Amino acid sequence: MLSNELPIGFIDSGVGGLTVVKEAMRQLPNEHILYLGDTARCPYGPRPAQQVVEFTWQMTQFLIDQGIKMLVIACNTATAVALDEIKAKVDIPVIGVIQPGSRSALKASHTGEIAVIGTEGTVKSATYEKELLEKSPDVHVRSLACPKFVPVVESNQFTSPVAKKIVAETLAPLMYNKPDTLILGCTHYPLLRPIIQNVMGSDVTLIDSGAETVNDLSTLLDYFNLNNYDRKVSKTCKFYTTGSPKMFRDIAGDWLDLKTLEVEHIHLGGK
Ligand code: DGL
């Protein structure tokens, strides 16, 4: 029997899942949060699918051992290859970020011209295409891998001139026959959102797949009657990283606007 007071777990290869946590803190301020970023092994994007499944399972087991009532795979690359397997293995509700992002893109697009940007792993899996075309066979979907984006974010350079140059160069192929809707198919990308919007132009609607996931998370909490109603214990957020706690704290503190932040270093697997 799951307890309503348990935290919700979030996992990502690094700091990207914080974009999902930020939205969860806004929409679900009563919920306790446990976050694990596998920064030491980031990026997941170029890794073979089987290795991403293995790492995702290690992160899942770690958070389940700490005690969580629900798991959000706040990483598109991991969602693309590991969601079904993780769902089948654990007995708590698990959600990923791809279905909510796809649904929201279909709602936003008027021309049916949808583009997806993501890691090499996500693009190779073609999971967004499958989700979008299954629901709406007439839309036209283009996908573009942006392997340089995640390192820019993880090194805390996402507002720098270097970031602007990389984003403009990488997105150039989308400028011919522009989509009306662009899915940010990697949870790291919302940190680059102002730059991406500037490059794409204000006529392109950006979909933050992670933030959309929080709508589903909220629905699931209602469905399983798992909301935290206990207001006596003040809300807690705890963060784990396999990398440098300082770098994690710098990015997370700014992004989540938290003055104090509990960040603990852990090891996963053999590294
Ligand atoms: N944030 C992740 C995603 O949504 C993974 C980035 C990476 O590690 O390559 O895909």
Image (cartoon, helix red, strand yellow):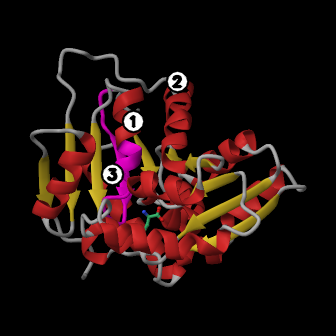
Image coordinates of residue 159 in percent, x first then y, are 31, 59
Q: Secondary structure at mark 2?
A: helix
The residue tagged 2 is 222
Viewer-nearest residue: 184 or 243 = 184
Residue 69 shows up from this direction? no
| Alpha carbon distance from label 2 to label 3 | 21 Å
Q: Residues within 10 Å of mark 3 (few under 14, many from 20)?
A: some
Lower sequence index among marks 2 and 3: 3
- Specify start and end residues of the magenta stretch as a single range: 5-21
Q: Residues within 10 Å of mark 1 (few under 14, many from 20)?
A: many
The residue tagged 3 is 64
| Alpha carbon distance from label 2 to label 1 | 14 Å
Image quadrant containing the N terminus = top left
Q: Secondary structure at mark 3?
A: helix
Lower sequence index among marks 1 and 3: 1
- Residue 178 higher or lower than 258, as above or below: below
Q: Residues within 10 Å of mark 2 (few under 14, many from 20)?
A: few
Look at label 1 and name its amino acid.
Ala
Image coordinates of residue 246 in percent, x first then y, are 10, 61
For residue 24, the mark is 1
24 relative position to 160: left or right? right
Give the farthest residue toward the right: 138
